Amino acid sequence: MFSYKKKYFLIIQSIYDINLNNIKANNKFFIIYRNHKTKEKLSEILKFRNKCKLKKFLFFVANNIVLARLLNSDGIYISSWNTSIKPSYFRHLNKSIIGSAHSVREITSKLNQGYNYVLVSKLFKVDYAPKEKFYGVIKFNRLLEINKKIIPLGGIKLINLNKLKIVRAEGFALMSEIKKKPAISNRLF
């Protein structure tokens, strides 16, 4: 049995990566639209955004302030490589900010800048870079001593969902597994 978390961060490359009809309406989900390769019609993205609103999912746009404003997103997601977007811009708009980080220095910097959540990569070994380092459960739980707003990302698959029971984070983030195995969204509820 999979352990339930308070928050699920689903990073999608396209609005077609996930079927929102498979997810029950609740306020646990953060949908992060991170499309930087293909152009999707604004009208289609807006329909997707409105469907998120109806289901009570928070909708974030990654690294694109203009699109975030057009879609009236709930906030913005700022990748670790992106230094052009300043989080202070969003404070006066009353929008949430989610960022990503790969080191303790980046985590601390983002938390000091007022990010609501920081997605930290990599929790487990990933297929696309099997020789790269990853935190693992014990080291990641130590990171949570810095701040509880840290969310694990990376290497989380259908086969290791049960290991998340011992990760003390209040949620977790999925990216590639959503597209590869859409059935994973059914296991989250």
Image (tube, rainbow, N blue to C red):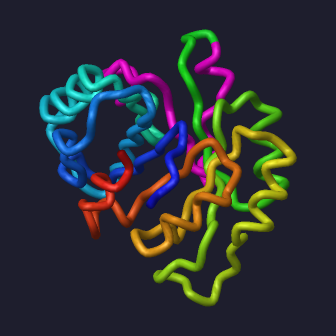
In the picture as drawn, the residue positioned furthest to the bottom comes out as: 131
Name the image quarter holding residue 134.
Answer: bottom right
Q: Quadrant of the C terminus?
A: top left
135 versus 13 height, above or below: below
Q: Whole-percent x and y of residue 138? A: 78, 67
Name the image quarter holding residue 86.
Answer: top right
Query: Toward the viewer: 182 or 37?
Result: 182
Number of disc labels = 0
154 versus 30 height, above or below: below
- Give the magenta-colored segment's residue range: 66-91
Q: What residue is rendered at 50% in x and 32% in y?
A: 76
Query: Toward the viewer: 139 or 59?
Result: 139
Q: Is residue 78 left or right of residue 49?
A: right
Q: In this view, does 144 lie to the left or right of 54?
A: right
Q: What residue is rendered at 42% in x and 26% in y?
A: 27
Q: Is residue 48 left or right of residue 101?
A: left
Q: Whole-percent x and y of residue 106? A: 77, 52
Q: What residue is rendered at 56% in x and 59% in y?
A: 153
Q: Does the magenta stretch include residue 69?
A: yes
Q: Whole-percent x and y of residue 6? A: 54, 37
Q: What residue is rendered at 70% in x and 72% in y?
A: 136
Q: Whole-percent x and y of residue 174? A: 45, 56
Q: Does the magenta stretch include residue 1?
A: no
Q: Quadrant of the N terminus?
A: bottom left
